[in-house]
Image: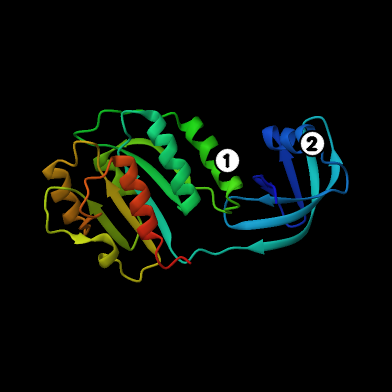
Amino acid sequence: MQFFYSKNIDDKFVILKGQEMIHCIAVLRKKINDLIYIVDGKGSLFYSKIIEIHSDYCKLLIESKKRVDRKINIHLLISPTKNHKRIEWMVEKVVEIGIERISFLICKNSIRQKINLDRLNKIALSAMKQTQNTFLPIIDQCIPFSEAFNLIDSQEKYIAHLHSKNNLSLDKALKKGNSRCIFIGPEGDFDKNEIEYSLSQNFIEVSLGLSRLRTETSGIVSTTILNIGNE
């Protein structure tokens, strides 16, 4: 089952443009009256019939609609790794697992302060379609650690760090809220002041296990754990 993505969807019709239209019509050679699946990235899947083909877009009639609702919204806030390829790999995997938002943090110990946002959005879109996921996450450009709190509206808030060996394991800290977020720091971990400020904002300090994980691995592991209850 091939998925295509569109932002141009109303009650009856879908407009497919750009690379999605090119892939559908020029590459896969879909024709008038062919039926395809369209996803809006917000949880809805549309079974649609091609009714018009033009040079720069095609129009489809919605035959049926299916809505997928997630029980828990997940927000990953993570410092970007020095190697951008590792960031790309992580984004691909957390989209496959399921996530609503990814925000990149500039912390005191962060090495990288810029990301290729266009590239990451393309990777996220591809991962969503290939895994037949219906949710495309928001990806935020790098922001200072202190400003990240303005983006957070989650009920459950966690920060994973290595300053203490007595932190509760993330899977044991989970509650029954419908939204969760977690802070993952850079290779040099969070600064103590960053941890203290997070705790003052009602974050819970947690552990991701006995192993000392790479930043990008921590992002994948924490996203997997935060998805507990989303089955």
Q: Residue at x 77, y 31 (%)?
A: 56
Q: Is residue 224 visible?
A: yes
Q: CA distance from mark 1 to mark 2?
A: 18 Å
Residue 63 against residue 92 in the figure, above or below:
below
Q: Measuring from the top left, give residue 1's x and y in whole percent.
A: 70, 51
Q: Amino acid at mark 1?
A: Ser
> What is the residue that sits farthest to the front in this orientation?
211
Q: Measuring from the top left, give residue 140's x and y in whole percent.
A: 41, 40
Q: Is residue 199 left or right of residue 24?
A: left
Looking at the picture, tell me which residue is in the foreground, 10 or 58: 58
Name the residue carrying label 2: 25
Report which quarter residue 166 is drawn in: bottom left
Q: Is residue 151 visible?
A: no
Name the residue carrying label 1: 126
Q: Amino acid at mark 2?
A: Ile
Task: Give neighbour class at mark 1: few <14, some 14-19, many 20+ (Cα, 10 Å).
Answer: some
